Each structure stands twice: as structure tokens, then as C-alpha cells.
Image (spheres, grey):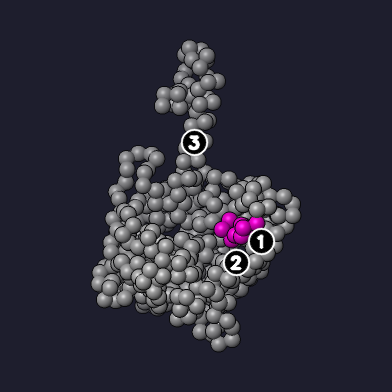
Amino acid sequence: MAGTTEPLLLLLTPPQQRHRRSAYFAWGWRLAVAAVLVMLLLLAVAGPLHPRRLFGAPPETVELTLLAGAADKGAVCLDGTAPGYQLQRGSGSGSKSWLIHLEGGGWCSTVEECSNRGMSPLGSSNSMEPIQFTDAGILDSDPELNPDFYNWNKVYVRYCDGASFSGDAEVFAQDGSTVYFRGLRIYEAVIDELVEKGLANATQALLTGCSAGGLATILHCDDFSAKFPQDVSVKCLADAGFFIDVKDISGERSFWSQYDRLVRLQNVREVLPKDCLTSKNPTECLFPAEIIKSIRTPMFILNSGYDSKQTTSGPDKAWLSCKDDIRNCNSTQIEVLDEFRNTMVNELKVVEDKKGWGMFIDSCFTHCQTIYGISWNSPVSPRLGNKTIADVVGNWHRGRSQGVKEIDCEYPCNPTCSSLLHT
């Protein structure tokens, strides 16, 4: 530890005393640089909701709350256990402001997949543990790191249905056990319980989610808004949830195939836009490009144009090095990724005409950026117009600037894209 602080002490020492330590300067400086790099790496790999705090005393743990009367409501996880959420109460000016985050974690689209998932925290509350919001971006309680939402009531809704909080069915697994697809009931029951716990008195509310939770945010945005009186400010923020229907690196439409199985297995039609269902396949209506056309509630779309979970899906071995790090991609592979990015940008053109909406589409090779402190608001956060994601989202939500719709140029034009970001 002394080695890491020695160079800082050297810089603050009067000139006449510095010669005493000159022999140690080169060694100490190298060690300090190495320590900083290690700290940045730790921040990057720690991920959201990490069980330890890297600096200072450990913060208060946010315990899991299980949904009351879950079985009677039919609102259960894949294995039949009660779903849960973490609630951290707001304070001061944020005591009547609510941020509800829907957890992500992919999907399961076969009975076998969902049955196996039921033995994990993404399918059973038996495996869920307490969490901490420290260093978790938009969930952080530090006013310097999260100035617009730090003191809000913050809820992290656990994801245990495998269909973006949208299914309503049940099947028997091969071993005879029942697999419950009750995501829609879980979402509705949790929101109803939060209404009883103070959400009914909210003066402003923000529904957020990442990845599969980002898709859930898009699916539920309008019905979430409908829960409140018209004088309550209600908005939605979808992070890494703008999944598009394109061929993956192996030439297959993998997301279409998975969504098609999902629609059939878990019966998600109830959450799909009715105007879309009148003329299009239900699977097509599950893609955000269709859903956002009918959404009336103000929404912010946060996504990487080179989303690491979308652009690198598929088993093609020739892409292994590229999938690990976009800097390893050859020119042909970059052209494929550019085409993906351009398709996303084109599908988001509808947002340009939507009043009160916002966008932050960067060109960093990453996935989920609101719940990681390193990407949300840190020295190495992605920036557009010299503003971090926290800056732009805050400006959009608070109305501090008009037309908060930022779209980055093609990779690798943005020097603020760091290899330390979550992929």
C-alpha cells in the first residue's frame, strides 16, 4: 500500500527534501500506474450490484423482498417460487420519486432451457441473494456519481421468468415437474405491491431495464404510465434492449428464431402492440422497432450501435477473436458490424419525430451501460458531445436541454470507447 501512495507524497514534498527519495521515484511511479490500472480493471469486472465496495466502508446491503401472496396470484418464477425485488427507500427531495429497474438476463425458449434455468437465480428465488447498489450506475446513492437519481426510491425487480416479464402459460418438463411462465403476472403483481408501499404517492417515476429487462421496459412502458394520474411525470429508459432482426455473424437470424420459439412457448401475445398484431406476425411484433411505433410515453433509448451481445451472437469460429475484442476484427468483419449499426440507426429514425424522447447510441463495443458505474459516469465513460450517459439521461429526464438525441459515428471514431467497458 505504501508503494502506491509514495509518488503522491513525492509530488507534495518540498523541493529540498525530494532528493532523499529520488532513488525510489521510477519504481514507485511504475507501481502507482500499475495500481491505477488494476483498480480500473476491478471496476470493470466487478459488474453491477457487486457484493463488495472497492473504496471506503461497505455500504448497506439491500435485502431481497419476496412478493406477498405470489402463489395465490399465480405470479411465480419458473420453478414455482415467489419472485422478489430489492427496495431501497428514497430520502429528502427524492422521497416521492421512484426508479424501477427490471433485471435482464436473456431468455429461455425451450422447455429444457427453462427447466434448467429454474435452478438458477434467473428462474428461482431460492438462489437469489441480497445485493448492493454501490458502483451500480443509475442505482448508486452517491450524489457525485448519480446526481439526478441518487436519493430516489430505487427498486431492482428480479428476473425469473425467462421472457422479459411477458409470458403467461405453464408446461410440464420431462421429469414431470411444472415449469411456470408467469412473467406478466410477476410484473403486474410487483408493481401493485409497490403501489401499496408508496408508489401511489409518486410525483415522478422512471421505469428502466437492461438487456432482456430493457425489452421488458419497452413492452410495459405505456401500461406502467397508465398506473399514474396525468399530473405525475412518468418516463421510461431502455438500456441495451433495442434488439433488431438481422442475420448474425453465422448468417442466421438467431434472434428471430429465439423470439419465435419464445412467443409460442410462453404465450406473450398479451403484451404485444395490438395494432401490430392486426397485420404482422407476433414474432415481428416482439422486436422494439415495431413496438416503439405505438408507444406514447416519453422514452430514452440507450444502446451501443455495436452491441456486443447482438453483433457477436452465433457459433462461427472465424469470429472468436473478434467476439472477444472488437479491436481484433478484420476489415471484412468491421463491415458486417457497420451494417448492423446502420440497420439499428435506420430503425431508430422514428424516434427523431417523437416529442419528449431521447437517444444515446454510442459506437462502443459493450452491452448494458446504466447499471455499471464505469460506463454510467466515470473518467472512462463513453461520451457523446463531451457528455457522459449520466449527463445526457439526466438532461433528458429533467428537461435541461431540448432534443437529447445523440447518435455516434461509426467505429472506431469515438476515442472515449474503452476496452474496460462491460461486454
Q: Quadrant of residue 70?
A: bottom left
- Residue sitting at 70 percent across and 59 percent down? 336
Q: Secondary structure at mark 2?
A: helix
Front disc: 1 or 3: 1
Neighbor class of circle 2 (other Cα within 10 Å; few <14, some 14-19, many 20+) is: some
Mark 2 to mark 3: distance in Å?
Answer: 37 Å
Of labels 1 and 3, earlier in sequence is: 3
Q: Which residue is mark 1?
A: 250
Three-letter residue code for mark 1: Ser
Horizontal placement of 404 versus 81: left or right? right
Q: Which residue is mark 2?
A: 254
Q: Which residue is mark 3?
A: 38
- Residue sitting at 40 percent across and 55 percent down? 139
Q: Secondary structure at mark 3?
A: helix
Mark 1 to mark 3: distance in Å?
Answer: 35 Å
Front disc: 2 or 3: 2
For the view shown, which residue lies furthest in the front direction? Answer: 175
**What span is in magenta?**
306-316
Q: Quadrant of residue 304?
A: bottom right
Q: Nearer the viewer, residue 330 or 120?
A: 120
Neighbor class of circle 1 (other Cα within 10 Å; few <14, some 14-19, many 20+) is: some
CB atoms of marks 1 and 2 within 8 Å = yes
Residue 107 percent coordinates (x, y): 48, 66
- Residue sitting at 54 percent across and 48 percent down? 421
Three-letter residue code for mark 2: Ser
- Residue sitting at 49 percent across and 15 percent down? 21
Q: Secondary structure at mark 1?
A: loop
For the view shown, which residue lies furthest in the bottom direction? Answer: 278
Q: Is residue 296 visible?
A: no
